[in-house]
């Protein structure tokens, strides 16, 4: 059996599709019917992939990981706050 755990992050949701960041590397587009109902931008999805050896079936179990989402949003907010403490007073742009 070829099993795998993956971390997907919902980057954006359009009319019928979601842009998903896969394992912090690749971006893919998935139809909305693939992701859990109620999933929204910024949600972390825990994905379990099962594919039996030499089988003709592949199974994905996708769940919203509320704890990972909360942690990711807190880390993002901390990073934004850290960036806001810049010593740059603004002003003219020098090229």
Image (cartoon, rainbow, N blue to C red):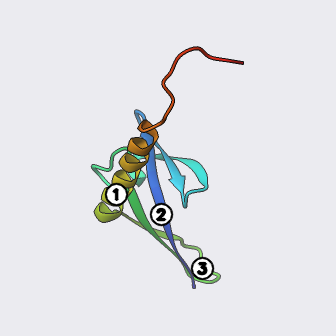
**Eye-nearest disc, 2 or 3:** 2
Residue 44 appears left or right of 24: left
First in sequence, mark 2 or 1: give its number. 2
Along the viewing direction, whichever of 45 and 37 lies nearer the viewer: 45
Along the viewing direction, whichever of 31 and 91 lies nearer the viewer: 91
First in sequence, mark 2 or 3: give its number. 2
Residue 71 appears left or right of 4: left
Tell me, yes or no, if residue 86 can be seen here. yes
**Eye-nearest disc, 2 or 1:** 1
Residue furthest toward the top?
Answer: 92
As helix, strand or loop, the secondary structure at mark 1 comes to: helix
Q: Which residue is mark 1?
A: 69
First in sequence, mark 3 or 1: give its number. 3
Quarter of the image where one finds residue 95: top right
Q: Which residue is mark 3?
A: 55
Residue 43 appears left or right of 53: left
Q: Residue at x 34, y 57 (%)?
A: 69
Q: Which residue is mark 2?
A: 7
Q: Residue at x 52, y 51 (%)?
A: 21
Q: Residue 38 location in percent, x, y?
A: 27, 49
């Amino acid at each position: 059996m070829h099993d795998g755990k993956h971390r997907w992050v919902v980057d954006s949701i359009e009319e019928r599709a979601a842009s998903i960041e896969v394992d912090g590397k690749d971006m893919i587009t998935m139809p909305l019917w693939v992701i859990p109902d109620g999933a929204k931008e910024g949600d972390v999805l825990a994905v379990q992939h099962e594919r039996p050896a030499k089988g003709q079936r592949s199974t994905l179990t996708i769940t919203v990981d509320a704890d990972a989402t909360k942690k990711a949003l807190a880390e993002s907010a901390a990073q934004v706050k850290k960036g806001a403490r810049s010593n740059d007073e603004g002003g003219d742009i020098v090229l």
